[in-house]
Image (cartoon, helix red, strand yellow):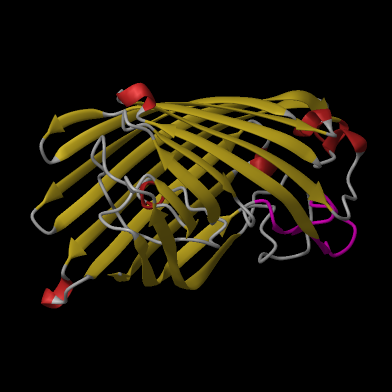
Amino acid sequence: MKIKITLLALSVAASPAFAKLADQQGFSGEISINTGVASSTSNFNTDADNNLSSIDQKASSESSFLVAPLGSVAYTFGEKLNHQVYTGTARDDVATGTVVLEVGYKYQLESGMVIDASLLPTIMSGETWADPYNTTSARTKTDETGNAFRLKLSSIAGSPFSLDMAYATKDVEHDDVPDELKRDADTFYLKGQYRQPLSRTMMLIPSIIYQTRDADGKAESYDQIGAEVSLFGTAGRHQYALTAGYNQRDYDAGSSLFNNTKRSDDNINLFAAYEYDQFMDWENWSFISLAGYGTSDSNITFYDESQYIVSVGLNYKF
């Protein structure tokens, strides 16, 4: 679960194996209004106290009220309705707790395979501490920028297998940390998944995930391997998605700040999303809700993190 709580669209869909891109040519989309509570416990949270007394201390928690008007829009075209340009957040991503803004293009082959290429213009952007480890004065904020590109191959050759690949760059404007902790980086992400129907209304999707980051600082470079399983289901107007994931991240080198100890993190993510269609018998409207929790347990206390979110809202499809 990525709680940079910038984007949370909170809608659920259990997609059939060979769904068309759209039922008809032209524009389609949805918009959701969501409210809730989110909390983050992290020494890198720029909404927390800018004073740090010791790099051995645990992070403090910061909670906030969330209001997130979000949505997506797509234009489908072609004789076989197999071309689509879109922008927004993908429903299948949201349902598993990964929410990013995308601008992209999809092409569906005769076999049902979909090639989906996109740009993620906001995922690498934000604020961070110029020196997160500063204990002698108030920490100051700096900007993070970067680009991310994604390629998804769904229902490869008409099979239940899919691949999700991404490449991203990150640049920290004022990175006032020791050389071994420099954060400018290139990251590669690979996720393979298999769709296994359990019944006409239920589907299980296990995934294996690999991620690697090559940063300017060796103590910020890592390899990560993990697994995830999602359960999608429907019952009348009710739709739900449950996701659990685990990954282990091992860093390439230690830092002098932490006695040259190589950092190692164990990450657990739990996520649940729910949708009730035709809420109050309103056509095209649905009630939506989610709850998510993530924790990162590091062998270096400074890097321990946790976050949660609970939200409800309404979604309108057009």
98 shown above or below 263: below
Q: Is residue 259 left or right of residue 235?
A: right
- Residue at the farthest front position: 79
Magenta segment range? Answer: 124-142
Q: Nearer the viewer, residue 52 or 228?
A: 228
> Where's residue 2, x and y in %?
52, 49
Question: Which quadrant of the structure image shows residue 259?
Answer: top right
Foreground residue, 43 or 203?
203
Q: Is residue 83 visible?
A: yes
Q: Nearer the viewer, residue 135 or 255?
A: 255
Q: Is residue 33 left or right of residue 118?
A: left
Q: Check if residue 139 falls in the magenta segment.
A: yes
Where's residue 232, x and y in %? Answer: 24, 42
What residue sits 36% from the left and 47% below the top?
92
Please identify the quadrant where the C terminus is shown.
Answer: bottom left
- Where residue 57 sits: x, y (%)? 70, 48
* In magenta stretch: residue 277: no
Q: Write the residue at 80% across / 42% down.
A: 183
Residue 23 in the figure: left or right of residue 226: left
Q: Is residue 259 above or below residue 277?
A: above
The answer to whether residue 240 is above or below residue 35 is above
